[in-house]
Amino acid sequence: MIAAARAATLLLAGLAAPVAQGDGRIDKAIAHIRSHIDSPITLGEVAAAAALSPGRFRHLFVAHTGTSFRVYVIWTRLNEAIQFAMAGRSWTEAAHAAGFADSAHLTRTFRRMFGISPAALVPR
């Protein structure tokens, strides 16, 4: 379980390549999500990029990643925003670069996921 948790954390943090589990379409979908993280992303759009119907994509995505599409996108956005902030960008710049509407949207999402504000992570 510990190894699986570490692998999932690395995957969500963007530090490890997705583990191939027999279906490269999910890898293609994850690459699409990461390359379009700064703009709105819909399940239908990513399913089309993976050449799957939305229903089949949803099922395969959960089976291969262990999480829902929506949660994966939110985690990826949060990770991107944290990386930008740690690189010295303002939280507003980090929020926009990661696809959040503004820094308030980022802060609300961050608090909902982690119970703290992002400023507590990287104080300015």
Image (cartoon, grey):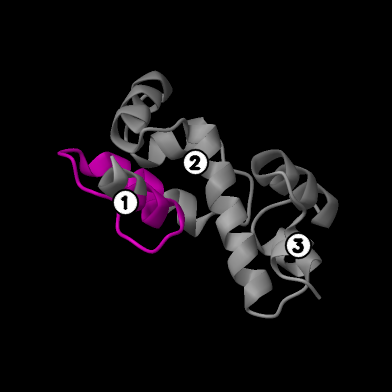
Q: CA distance from mark 2 to mark 3?
A: 23 Å
- Picture quarter with the N terminus: top left
Label 2 Cα crowd, 10 Å radius (few <14 / some 14-19 / many 20+): some
Q: Characterize the local packing of mark 1: few (<14), some (14-19) or many (20 or more) Cα atoms within 10 angstroms.
A: some
Residue range in magenta is 6-31
Question: On screen, 23 above or below 76?
Answer: above
Q: Secondary structure at mark 3?
A: helix
Quadrant for residue 50, please give it: top left
Please tell me which residue lies in front, 43 or 74.
Answer: 74
Q: CA distance from mark 1 to mark 2?
A: 14 Å
* Number of marks drawn: 3
Q: Secondary structure at mark 1?
A: helix
* Residue type at numbered disc 2: Tyr
Q: Position of residue 90 (x, y in %)?
A: 78, 73
Indicate whether residue 91 is drawn in magenta: no
Task: Identify the disc placed on residue 7.
Answer: 1
- Displayed quadrant of residue 73: top right
* Residue position for label 3: 120
Q: Amino acid at mark 3?
A: Ala
- Looking at the image, the residue that sits furthest to the right is 104
Q: Residue at the location (81% across, 57% down)?
A: 103
Q: Nearer the viewer, mark 1 or mark 3?
A: 3
**Residue to which mark 2 is pinned:** 72
- Report the residue at 80% width, 65% height from top: 92
Q: Earlier in the sequence, mark 1 or mark 2?
A: 1
Horizontally, residue 1 falls left or right of residue 43, namely left
